[in-house]
Image: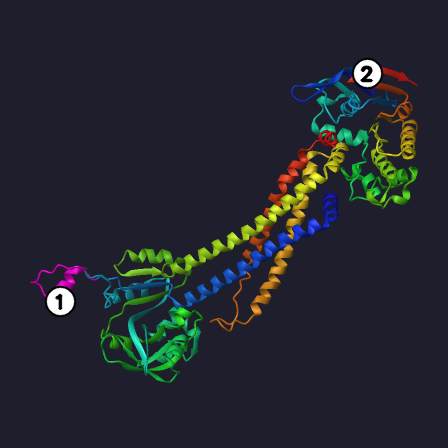
Amino acid sequence: MLFLAIRHLLSRRRQTILIFLGISLASMVYVVISGLYLGMQEYMIDRLLNNTAHIKISARDQSIDQPEMTKRFYGNDTAVSWITPPSGKREEAHIMYPQGWFDRLRDDPDVRAFAAGLSVNVIISRRDTKRAGVLGGIEPDKQIKVTGLEHYMSVGSLLDLSGGGNKIIIGDGLLERIGARVGETIKVSAGSEEPRPFKVVGLLHLGVAEIDNTLMLAALRDVQQINKSPGQINEISVSLFDLDRAQELADSWKLLSRDKVESWSEANAGFFEIFNLQDFIRYTISVAILLVASFGIYNVLSIMVNQKRREIAILRSIGYSPHQVLELFLIQGIILGIGGALTGLGIGVLLKQYLGTIELQAMQIDHLNLSYAPSIYIGGFLLAFVSSLVASVLPARAASKLTPIDIIRSE
Amino acid sequence: MAIVCENLIKEFGEPPTRIIHGLDFDIADGEFLSISGRSGSGKSTLLYLISTLDMPTEGFVTIDGKVSSDMSVEELHNFRNENIGFVFQFHYLLAELTALENVLLPPRRTGMHEAKREQALSLLKDFGIEDKQNHLPSQMSGGEQQRVAIARALIMEPKYIFADEPTGNLDSVNGQIVMELLTRINRDRGSTLVIVTHEQDYAKMAEREIYLVDGHITEEETA
């Protein structure tokens, strides 16, 4: 039946080309959109994973409560009725027993490395320009083993912070915003304390604006001093041998302490929601396009079945079975599906390669990051092929149900 | 007897309208039978019943010793493919196939088309259209198209040929050519030939003529 199916398709060239283009377009759009979305997701995950620990242990949130505030401001003997009760989180929250965590993590076979840290809210200033941000106090030699931040140092190294001495590494976006340069000294203040001078010794560029515009790192000891909390830490970053076990380990560690334990996926849940939304949009667009192409196939094959009634009658009268007639039209759908899908995939790859060469000067990234994951091509092919097959089943079944005598009588 | 019809009744619609009224007749092996009658007399319906394309409401058609209504769908397809050649008023050629490919359509069903190629060319030559073998139906005259359809009906060397108004769409010259061809096939090959025609001149070319009026055989003449 392949011979007859090909002849049928060739005899309706214009219709065949239109359906072919429809399917090709659908699979091409799927490949390009998926490549863009997945590429972007891979880019983001890569940076998130390199910037954040696999598991982060931080001080539990301590809420400001009414009795504490009353006691602090009015003493024990005064009865106070608050019109608007105090609320919020206490800034000085810190991990109460860090040594216990250190001992546990050091003995845990799943843990590759860990590093203590202290993050505090600060204001940095250079002349009249001020910016608020979070200064992360780190242990450079340990931090290097926990995250891949070192790879994103555009100037200097995390190890430049070793030994303290009021040195700071900041995101290049933030540096630009305060108009400073590497080697220059900026002032950093925490709370109401006098600003302290910090020398900019390095620059970070992760390509994620919200990080590059806010990130500041200094030696842990310097941050503890500026925060007037010597020996205190409020986070421990943990790196694992097996990233996939992060959630499972985080869940088990949560039971050991009141401190907050978060896996990297929990900490970046917002990003994953965005990814899910992107996937939803991607599938919706692709399905919409494929539906249009499917209706095209369905319509053209239905018209073809009507136009070929006499031919179906003769095929049936000379012994072709209903099954063979069904095959005849189904094969046409399959040829269009496979041919259209493969053509679309090919054009999609070429288009992606072209898009990958476009320079994006206005954005934080130089070029679009496009994914070439095999799953995209398998998905694109299957979507196009299955929709073509499904769209051709109904007309093919209608053709197979025609009896020669009914056709001849209706002529 | 090649074909035996017993108490053949065919009804259509709801409430049922009887088109064929209890016909009994036989067709001998190698016989040339014509069925004629006015439009609506049931002659085409009768042809479809005896050729297994349609099944009777009541009664039986026994062809080649088998009762048509007892045959399975698969048996019917195989029987038609191997034993029956159809020629219709409208040639029903596949528009996208050449004359030769159309002739080879029945053996293509079982993958025998290459083996039958020489025979197909011989048939086209015999019918005077060998130079049209690579032409599409749209590039041939009505008479040439009908000759291709007859060649297609003969390619499997069928025992039975059923022709429904084979000249109905042709001018008198081409009509005469087609009738002479069919007569020659019946004579030379010994195929049983049953044709339906409303043209008395062509009906009289048969060895036996059945005349139908409202589904009844009113006259039966033997040449």
Q: Tell me the chain of label 1.
A: A
Residue A348: percent from the left, percent from the top? 60, 60
Q: Nearer the viewer, residue A182 or B92?
A: B92
Q: Tell me the chain of label 2.
A: B
Q: Is residue A213 left or right of residue B184?
A: left
Q: Is residue B72 left or right of residue A61?
A: right
Tell me whether the residue at label 2 lies in contact with that at label 1, contact meaning CB atoms closer than 8 angstroms: no
Can you tell which quarter of the image residue B114 is in? top right
Check disc 2 and report the residue beneath it: B217
Reply yes or no: does residue A69 show up in magenta: yes
Co-location on one chain, circles 2 and 1: no
Q: Nearer the viewer, residue A83 or B79?
A: A83
Region in magenta: A64-84
Check disc 1 and report the residue beneath it: A73
Q: Is residue A83 left or right of residue B16?
A: left
Compared with B28, B176 (above or below) is below
Q: Residues within 10 Å of mark 1 (few under 14, many from 20)?
A: few
Residue A344: percent from the left, percent from the top? 62, 56
Compared with A284, A372 (above or below) is below
The reply to whether residue A165 is visible in this rendering is no
Element carrying mark 1: helix
